[in-house]
Image (cartoon, rainbow, N blue to C red):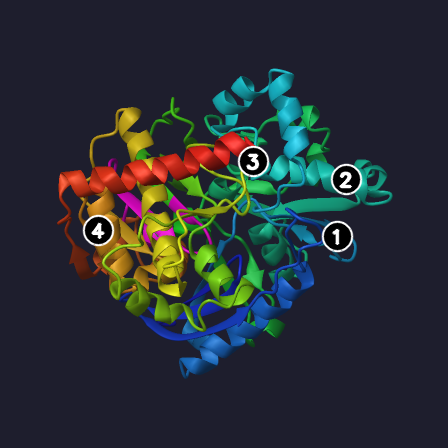
Amino acid sequence: MPDFLLAIDQGTTSSRAIVFGADGLPRGSAQIELPQIYPHPGWVEHDPDRIWQDSVTTCRAAVSDAGLEADDIAAIGIANQRETVVVWERASGRPIHNAIVWQDRRTARACDALREEGHEDTLRMRTGLVADPYFSATKLAWLLDSVDGARAAARRGELAFGTIDSFLLWHLTGGEVHATDVTNASRTLLFDIRRLNWDEDLFELFDIPLAMAPEVRSNVSDFGFAEPSILGRAVPICGIAGDQQAAAIGQACIRPGMIKATYGTGAFILLDTGPDPVLSENRLLTTVAFRVGDHCHYAVEGSIFVAGAAVQWLRDGVGVIGDAADTEALAESLADTGDVYLVPAFAGLGAPHWDAAARGAIVGLTQNSGAAQLVRAALEAAAFQTYDVLAAMTADGAAPPLALRVDGGMAANSWMLGFLADIANVRVERPVVTETTALGAVILASIGVGWFADLTAAERMWRLDRGFDPAMTTDRRANLLGGWQRAVEAVCVVHG
């Protein structure tokens, strides 16, 4: 049996691949930045062919970086940006349009109509989600309505749809396998999270032919083989999960009450609620956490649309910084922001506000405000938004967590994690391996290939790097949160 596993981690801003050993430590990696396409304000697209090509390139490069060959790779696991949807021709595999990204807001009016027509309660009960452009169904309907001939071709059975995992799987297997997993399916607004299957009534509601849909499988499954042309031999694909669920697995948050937060382009907080779905009364999402064999867990999720993307905007959009790594020293150089707050509602506000019309704002500026204040405000915004989600979870009856496990690119910033611990008033734990999305994908693959029997493998692989304990006074925390709340209310009042 080969000794290594390969993770494909296809994200919003990059495609990467990482080779792991059986101990859960990375051995080699490769990453390629993914260009963002903005056809109109509020629209976000990706080139699916670029995603596919870069995924192949990074897989080969990661294996090479590890000093290995295809014969050393036991299996492949896939983790992917969720909700982003692609439609392609069954005969050729060619996309009929760019992928529409989860951040895209073009279907906001369609979601308004769903609410006005009284469908939101049905959507919430069946899918655990809300009527928001974030999810796949309205994006898919837009593609069928907007691409010439697409709807007729779909009705003839000539088109397939899928989230990014399905698109990659289709191409990896040479068109042999059109499938997805329960976690990705649960983010489409088309999936019944209790029956764990597609919901025919919802397909009819959105006027989407069910024949376009991929087969839904457990996270650990026989997903076919990557063609020999990819790595040099046929390698089994044994695990797939949406990136946030994969990160929760990589963080060993596999038991009820455990919680993780991933800080990438956005920030996503998942609380494991066990074998029964829990519907939030505070506008959080209910989603499938994992299904391995007959063992299924659910999670309550708070989705924050902009976290690291605010730092990226400061770097690329306005040129305030040259490198994201500079943010820690800049933030530490100040005692505070001088009451400057950055509300990064670049794509509306996610949980618990769900205000698609909100737009970003910087409040509290004075002549003394400069680059350092803006940078620190961007980092603080990630913590404030996390607090909002945790407060909503508490209002839903969740017990205060013993620790919040964190990962993603922003988790490298120790100042931000210390501020997060202070604002959330909870211990924050950063693992040795912060690429937990990729780690979760290979943990699933390791079960599929027979290395481990169940998800307790994740607990064996998780290692603490550093913990951050809260030290802020109650009054200071309350003052900061009060300023944040006023800034958010101003955005929602003006644009909501």
Say what secondary structure mark 4 lies in.
Answer: strand
Q: Is residue 175 above or below residue 158?
A: below
- Upstream in the sequence, badge 3 or badge 4? 3
Of tags 2 and 3, which is closer to the observer? 3
Give the residue furthest to the bottom.
Answer: 67
Asked which quadrant contains residue 378, the reply is: bottom left
Give how far across and how far down residue 47 sits, in percent: 67, 60
Q: Which residue is mark 3?
A: 356
Left or right: 50 as drawn, with respect to 289: right
The mark found on residue 287 in the picture is: none
Q: Which residues are magenta?
A: 248-268
- Upstream in the sequence, badge 2 or badge 4? 2
The mark found on residue 97 in the picture is: 1
Q: Which residue is mark 2?
A: 144
- Upstream in the sequence, badge 4 or badge 1? 1
Residue at 21% across, 31% down = 399
Residue at 28% across, 57% down = 416
Q: Amino acid at mark 1?
A: His
Left or right: 380 as drawn, with respect to 175: left
Find out whether the residues at labels 4 and 1 contact each other: C-beta distance under 8 Å.
Answer: no
Residue at 65% across, 65% down = 50
Of tags 4 and 1, which is closer to the observer? 4
- Upstream in the sequence, badge 3 or badge 1? 1
